[in-house]
Image (cartoon, rainbow, N blue to C red):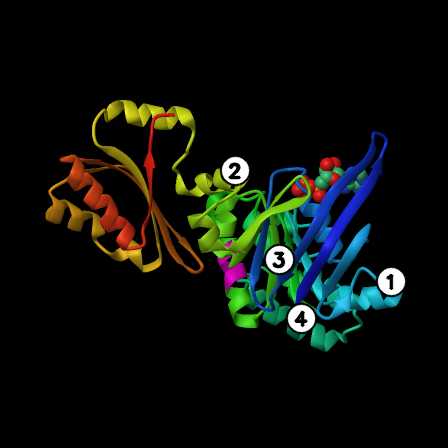
Amino acid sequence: MIELSNITKVYSTKNGELKAVDGVSLEIQKGEIYGIIGYSGAGKSTMIRLLNGLEKPTSGTVVVNGQNISAISGSKLRAARQKISMIFQHFNLLWSRTVEENIEFPLEIAGVPKAERSKRVGELIELVGLAGRGKAYPSQLSGGQKQRVGIARALANNPEVLLCDEATSALDPETTDSILELLLDINKRLGLTIVLITHEMHVIRKVCHRVAVMEAGKVVESGDVLHVFQNPQAQITKKFVSQVSGTSDTKESIEQILANYPSGKLVKVTFIGQQTEQPIISQIIQQYGVDVNIVHGTISHTTSGPYGTLIVHIDGDESKVDIALQILKRHEIQTEVIEHA
Ligand code: ADP
């Protein structure tokens, strides 16, 4: 559906050349929700502009829906861009137009007749949950409602791809969740391919099927969300994962926990999928007579299933503690003994 091959984007600045995107290749499948996460300056916005043809790569190719976006221009590019829609952090609505008129705008530009436009606007208002608000102006709406208008407007011309540029970053956590649920719903109902950029792992966890982690213009890690959550490799990915798992791995906090448990073993246990529902911890307590104290724990839900991290302190006879650890491993549960630094 979307294929980026060896993309580099270099900007000339007064301080010399700046590589905003540096040798990125990735493939996004039709109908998936793909997240690109990175801190400010990582190159995410540049990637989005390359995907919708607003920027040309310095080298490499961008193919969207079978068309080489990086090689076309003029009316061909405009036609291709009608199938690539976008929503924005600050909504970019027309403030002097009502909700209906905002949603109608891209249909007017596409030359859709009035009667058809009105029908389509009605459908879109229903789809995004804004029934009864059609005559309101953007200034009369909450942030979440404004983004719903943005989404309806983006869907007006039946796009193949929806690009989301930090679409929930200006919203409070509850509203963020309701907008993410709407995106999931639209993805399922319409089979729409969604690419989103964000600096929040919560957004990735909640809606994405796959993720690419960007740092200094490069994709440092990519894969299925559940897999990346379970096995983060790059330092930056570990940091993002700890945003949502709540198990901050900083040396200080681990040293603090270790100080409280001079004997036994402190173990970080990561569960995924069905394992989170099995009472394995209570089994090892009963069968091997070890003491298990849960020091910290969270279970989060991703689109592909639950994911959990526990920090447990296992104490008792040394050989029994070792057997307990082996049992956890035999259940294919990832364990990591935390040692003093
Ligand atoms: P992000 O969206 O992850 O914050 P950007 O893609 O906006 O990252 O920026 C990546 C790098 O490219 C930054 O160092 C930024 O300053 C630089 N950059 C982005 N756009 C331009 C531009 N038009 N001209 C010069 N430098 C740019």
Q: Amino acid at mark 4?
A: Asn
Decide: few, some or many residues near mark 4? Use Cα within 10 Å; few <14, some 14-19, many ≥20: some
Q: Secondary structure at mark 2?
A: helix
Mark 4 / mark 3, whichever is N-terminal: 4
Q: CA distance from mark 1 to mark 4?
A: 21 Å
Mark 2 / mark 4, whichever is N-terminal: 4
On-image quarter of the N terminus = bottom right
Q: Secondary structure at mark 1?
A: loop
Q: Which residues are magenta?
A: 180-184
Which one is in front in this view, the residue at disc 1 or the one at disc 4?
1
**Residue at mark 1:** 73
Label placed on residue 195? 3
Q: Amino acid at mark 3?
A: Val
Residue occupying the point 48% across, 50% down: 228
Residue 292, percent from left and from top: 19, 39
Q: Secondary structure at mark 4?
A: loop
Label placed on residue 158? 4
Residue 62, percent from left and from top: 75, 60
Above or below, 227 relative to 64: above
Mark 1 / mark 3, whichever is N-terminal: 1
